[in-house]
Image (tube, helix red, strand yellow):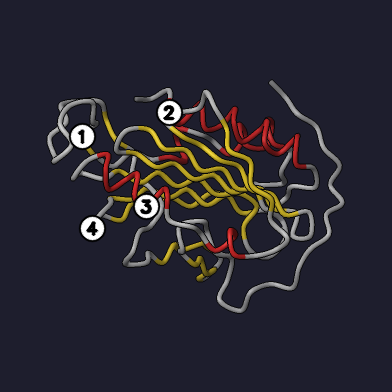
Amino acid sequence: MKLHRRRSVSRMPPDPRGPQNGLGVYNRRVRGRQVALMAVALGGVVACSSGGGGGSDGGGLVTCAPVDLCAQVPVARVTAVCGTDASAIFYQNTPGNPADTDTCIYSGAGPGMAFEIDRGCFPSGAAIARAYYDTPNLASMLPDYTREDLSGVGDAAYFQYSPLRGQGLLYVLQGNLMVFLRDDQAPDAAVTKACLLVLVGDVLAAH
């Protein structure tokens, strides 16, 4: 599935801290690479292999283990599906509490990033994953973002979009996983939502 879009996007002045992902994590460019700075509360997501659950929530969980999201969703795939100008990637795995995190940053021609995928795996179970999913993110507090709850994707999902910033965000909860996708080159809400749903399908298909 290939979705085309125009490239002209109205941009907001950059945040001096760098672009923030939906999990409260700021990313700064260091020596030409994006380095994800993990917040204590939660950072992105870890690729998790299927396996026995464990944790406090009983069965139906996956066992958290690092997986390279950049290899799972290559830059060519992101460019083809979402029409970004991404050309370089940076992967980082960050073990932590309450979630282990895998992050893939896709850099474009301009400053900052073009696209981001995070996957958080909560070893203690689905209940804590749900609690973080239900916690309002920064975009929920800003007037220029709309929110649409989605059905048929994971256990729960919602899409946020800001025409002012040209940014689309997708959050998906599935068991003890929380997946986050961010498109910073998003001039159209419907096209952006469609492309993010395609790519989150790639991520969840591994489980």
Give the residue displayed 71% in from the left and 39% down from the top.
192
Q: Secondary structure at mark 3?
A: helix
The residue to which callout 4 is attached is: 97
- Give the distance between the C-alpha atoms of the residues marked 4 and 3, in whole angstroms: 12 Å
Q: Secondary structure at mark 1?
A: strand
Give the residue displayed 47% in from the left and 38% down from the top.
172
- Give the distance between the C-alpha atoms of the residues marked 1 and 3, in whole angstroms: 19 Å
Q: Amino acid at mark 2?
A: Leu
- Give the distance between the C-alpha atoms of the residues marked 1 and 2, in whole angstroms: 14 Å
- Give the distance between the C-alpha atoms of the residues marked 3 and 2, in whole angstroms: 18 Å
Q: Secondary structure at mark 4?
A: loop
Q: Amino acid at mark 1?
A: Thr
First in sequence: mark 1 vs mark 2:
1
| 47 is higher (above) or lower (below) than 92 | above
Residue 202, horizontal then vertical, whole percent = 50, 27
Rate crowding at label 1 as few (under 14), some (14 to 19) or many (20 or more) other CA atoms within 10 Å: some
* Res 204 label: 2
Q: Is residue 138 left or right of residue 52?
A: right
Q: 55 or 120, which is in the foreground?
A: 55
* Res 132 label: 3
The residue to which callout 1 is attached is: 63
- Give the distance between the C-alpha atoms of the residues marked 4 and 2, in whole angstroms: 22 Å
